[in-house]
Image (cartoon, rainbow, N blue to C red):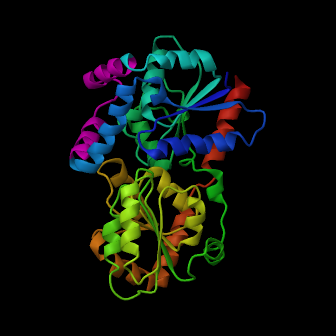
Amino acid sequence: MASILLLHATAGAGHTRAAQAVAAALLANDQTDVQVTDILACTSSLFRKMYVKSYIDLVQHAPRLWGYLYEKHDKMRAADSKTARTRLLFDKANSRRFKDLLTETNPKVILCTHFLPLELLSDRKQRGKLTTPVHAVITDVSPHAFWVYPHIDHYHVANAASARELECKGIPPERISVTGIPVDPIFAQQTSAPQMRAQLGLPERPTVLLLSGGFGVGPLLDMLNSFEGEDCGLSLVVVAGRNAELEAACHERAQTLKTPVTVHGFVNNIHELMDAADLVVTKPGGLTTNEILAKGKPMALVAPIPGQEQRNCEHLLEEGAAVRLYDVADARWFFTQLFSNAEKLASMQHHARRVARPQAAMHIADHLLQQLVDG
């Protein structure tokens, strides 16, 4: 049994990290029984493989199609459309073990960081099969219609604009809290860049952290290729994620460059690497960008996926916390120009700290704990 059940889906690493962040905040309270579960573990192996692979294949190989589908389905109410009803039947048929999970855990509160369990839970609440309060954490700045279901008790969103968008899609304002997107509490802790560079054995020079995300996607190699030639005075740290082929290619390329490059695969100390950096280069995923904001670091954004990442990108640019690198083959020039403008970097850092919500996970955890008290 679990007092609080946190449901995520491993279709994109951010949904998992959001659930883990709230769990870390909850576990600071020794009296709380928390269980974190991947909703896809309750589905058939074929469905699970298809669900993850289809998303990754679309965003990698057909991003414009993904963007079209994202925009098209955002214009219709997720719970009301014929497409949504068909999807619900399909998802229910492939997640029969989900009912067993709810029976076994018998949670007093449920929180979801992905829309798939929201769809299934809203359906059960509508049919009178579930009375447990269900909360949702929307992991991007823009609440897509896929997240909007009438029987979800409460939504936690990134900012006031996110809340307004959710209201316009039919959720009453009293069921919405502007908490920020939850990141692990460790990102609220900060160590100076020179101190962390010394701790990690990195050169003491302006440092750029190049991220590819947990799945190891993004134009890392193209950016490294732009550093061919003389040492430009920067230090590069590359994180290739779980993409072993990309990691190997980056290692090989780094050995040919005069600018110092440190290459990693998947890491567990990304918070330390962010501390060591003066600029973080990333695709604008919801979790990653909010972790960077929590660290108060300026961002250069690359290759946003049409849809949720494009909206995240536009938000960060509007807030002044990021710049956009359009031509990754010219990354060297772009970064050296940026580092020659100390005023611009300082302004980006200021705005990153201004919009950051490093305590979001704690605020959400407090809300869930109060829900337990209120019964």
Where 8 falls versus 269 (above or below)? above
Foreground pick, 219 / 172: 219
Foreground pick, 292 / 148: 292
**Residue drawn at point x = 41 percent, y = 84 percent:** 258
Q: Residue furthest right?
A: 30
Determine whether, in the image, residue 174 is placed left or right of residue 70.
right
Where 237 falls versus 92 (above or below)? below
Determine whether, in the image, residue 251 is placed left or right of residue 179.
left
The verdict on residue 77 being magenta is yes
Q: Give the range drawn in magenta.
A: 65-92
**Image quadrant where one finds the C terminus:** top right
Q: Where is residue 3 in the image (x, y as percent from the top left)?
A: 68, 26
Determine whether, in the image, residue 133 is placed left or right of residue 144.
right
Where 52 falls versus 294 (above or below)? above
Q: Where is residue 206 in the image (x, y as percent from the top left)?
A: 51, 81
Is residue 296 visible to us here?
no
Principal SS element in the magenta part?
A: helix
**Residue drawn at point x = 61 percent, y = 17 percent:** 104
Determine whether, in the image, residue 346 is placed left or right of residue 192.
left
| Quarter holding residue 191 | bottom right
Where 121 falls versus 192 (above or below)? above
| Quarter holding residue 103 | top right
